[in-house]
Amino acid sequence: MAVLSKFTLDLTALRRSRDYRVLALGALVSGLGNQAALVAVPYQVYVLTHSTALVGLIGAAELVPMVIVSLFGGAIADRMDRRRILIAAQAGTLVSAGTLAALSFAGHPPVWLIFVLAALLAAAGSLDLIARSSMIAGLAGEWLRSAIAFNFGMSQLTAIVGPGLGGVVIGAAGVGWVYAIDAASVVLSAFAALTIAPQRPQGSERHEPILASVRTGLRYVRSNSALIGSFVIDLSAMTFGMPRALFVVLSLRVYHAGAAGTGLLYASVSAGAALAALTNAWLAHARWIGRITILMVVVWGAAIALTATVSSIVLAALLLAVAGAADSISAVCRTTIAQLVTPDAMRGRMSAVYTLVVTGGVRLGDIESGTVASLTTPRFSVLSGGLACLVGVGVVMFAFPELARFDTRQHAAPVASLVT
């Protein structure tokens, strides 16, 4: 039983903290709607335009507001109740998703308007993630690693069910209902957040001007080589090795599997990630998590490159699941590094940069994969991206050797004092 417990999901934080439990379950509900909408936007754009380049440019439209919201949202999260920021983010998602639903029900919306609303939806999602990330240490305290692992496991569970649900709903009722589900899910999550105790940051009540605060946060991230190395290796992996924008193209043009196939490809990455997350209790005792991060990014890049060589959607889904499992382990390690090295007064700004890397890298990947596919073929785009990811690992190891030397035993003590 002792051996088995190392490979099951650690639920300690969920049992011990009522407010963390509310936060996590609220994220589960809203995550289902968000992930369903993740399929709807590129599917709708591709059906309206039949352009792989435009599907890839969705990421470009989302990136600018995400950068602005992430940087300033992080500074704001270090000076006011983070629970209120979370509720504001949910309101933004409600407005964006609700408008997309209304336009879709009314007929064929202009593509430019879909881009604008998708950008607003991404900005609200970034703010949501910043608020949740900056709250987790205060809610979980000494059970931080348990909370991080559970959060990632549940996020991957929603990323399995959500895209599959989105694909089925699109095929049965149309994209409008997917957006409506997203809008309804955040209403429930916002009501859950209202029951959490106020989450004000610890530290001095005196604050720098907002622009100076943003610069201070960026300087802090840049000053920690292991932290910035973990950010750069993930940014490289997502920019070159995440062919998300091509899933709809691969499903419709290569595998001829329709909307359901699109949902399968999206869900496959998350299925592997969820399986890894649900069996990752051993990570709570891992010491050299920087080295684990590096190894998992190698597995990710290799699996993505191999995906380009298969002709069956089932084999492609299996390889994407392997990639997702590697990303799951890497994500838990990177999140743990970020939380362990960051003081609470800086946590909002660090979470902003982390959110920008995690979500922005995927959008850059949309642009990269869509552009390369439009100039060559979808298969070549996937293959070249996976290989470029492997090259990026070598560059990061050379530029940031402290990542491989990161030792959790040197950073565990400060987090235990953060119990709210």
Image (spheres, rainbow, N blue to C red):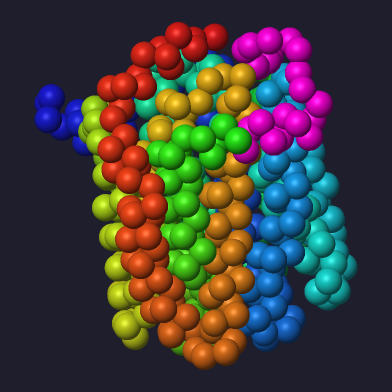
The answer to whether residue 115 is visible is yes
Asked whether the viewer can see residue 20, the reply is: no
Q: How many marks?
A: 0
Q: Nearer the viewer, residue 141 or 224?
A: 224
Identity of the residue drawn at 78% across and 34% down: 211
Residue 334: quadrant of the picture = top left
Asked whether 344 falls inside the magenta stretch, the response is no
Task: Give the quadrant of residue 305.
Answer: bottom left
| Residue 121: % across, % down | 73, 52
Q: Position of residue 47 (x, y in %)?
A: 69, 80
Residue 384 is left or right of residue 209, and the answer is left
Residue 277 in the image, given as x and y percentages of width and height = 34, 42
Which range of residues does the magenta coloring cover? 197-218
Q: Is 20 drawn above or below residue 168 in the view shown? A: above
Q: What residue is rendered at 61% in x and 71% in y?
A: 367
Who is closer to the viewer here, 30 or 295? 295
In the image, is 86 to the left or to the right of 143? Answer: right
